[in-house]
Image: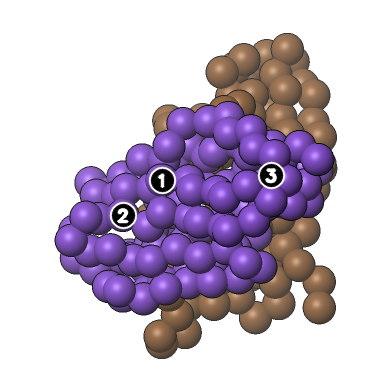
Amino acid sequence: GNSVTQMEGPVTLSEEAFLTINCTYTATGYPSLFWYVQYPGEGLQLLLKATKADDKGSNKGFEATYRKETTSFHLEKGSVQVSDSAVYFCALSRAGAGKSTFGDGTTLTVKP
Amino acid sequence: GAGVSQTPSNKVTEKGKYVELRCDPISGHTALYWYRQSLGQGPEFLIYFQGTGAADDSGLPNDRFFAVRPEGSVSTLKIQRTERGDSAVYLCASSSRDRGNTGELFFGEGSRLTVL
């Protein structure tokens, strides 16, 4: 079956530090890959996505590249801010298959 | 442009009681999903509706859990004879499953269920 493995947290960084959160997946076929973010007190929301190999998704300074050869979709940001403190979830979805599969989430805390 | 709405936001009940959780998806979204999220874990799939019918209910843990979407819009998740292990945040999401859609989900804020 499909599965997503995320780097375990929590992750604590100082403001302006470089962020990487690792994500690898197992899936049949060619899934779409997503990063969702959950800010304190809010629901999950889409951060970025990529739908095919070598695509790069980007939003709010975050980037992730769909690497089929390593089955990875690592999340990066060059300079984090306090407002980036949240829980980040990696997920995959196969077109036409309905459900999405999520990782267990990585909690990021950014200190001023 | 309302988002996905879930009620109640918080529900405390006693073991053995019956519970209903409601989800109102984004207008026009044909696909509706229920997930369950326990502390420290990612959302766990329960059931997926396409229109009025359950297209995939493989995630429902047992026959105490049931969900309906009679008119293809609002959905209700029903839990009978609740157990302490059912305590979790129940998330509802909707999406547009038009051709070319890549599966992006729009989530509500969840219903936190606590079974005492």
Q: Are marks 2 and 1 in contact (CB under 8 Å)?
A: yes
Q: Is residue A26 visible?
A: yes
Circle 1 is placed at which residue position?
A22
- Give the chain of mark 2: A
Choose between B73 and A19: the one closer to the eye: A19
The residue under label 3 is A86
Q: Position of residue B45 (x, y in %)?
A: 46, 45
Point 24% across, 68% down: residue: A30
Q: Quadrant of the N terminus of chain B?
A: bottom right
Q: Secondary structure at mark 2?
A: loop
- Looking at the rendered image, the quarter that the C terminus of chain B falls into is top right
Q: Answer with mark 1 or mark 3, whichever residue precedes in sequence.
A: 1
| Marker disc for residue A72 | 2
Which amino acid type is shown beneath numbered disc 1? Asn
How far across and down, in percent of the image, does residue B77 sit? 62, 45
Q: Can residue B21 be seen here?
A: no
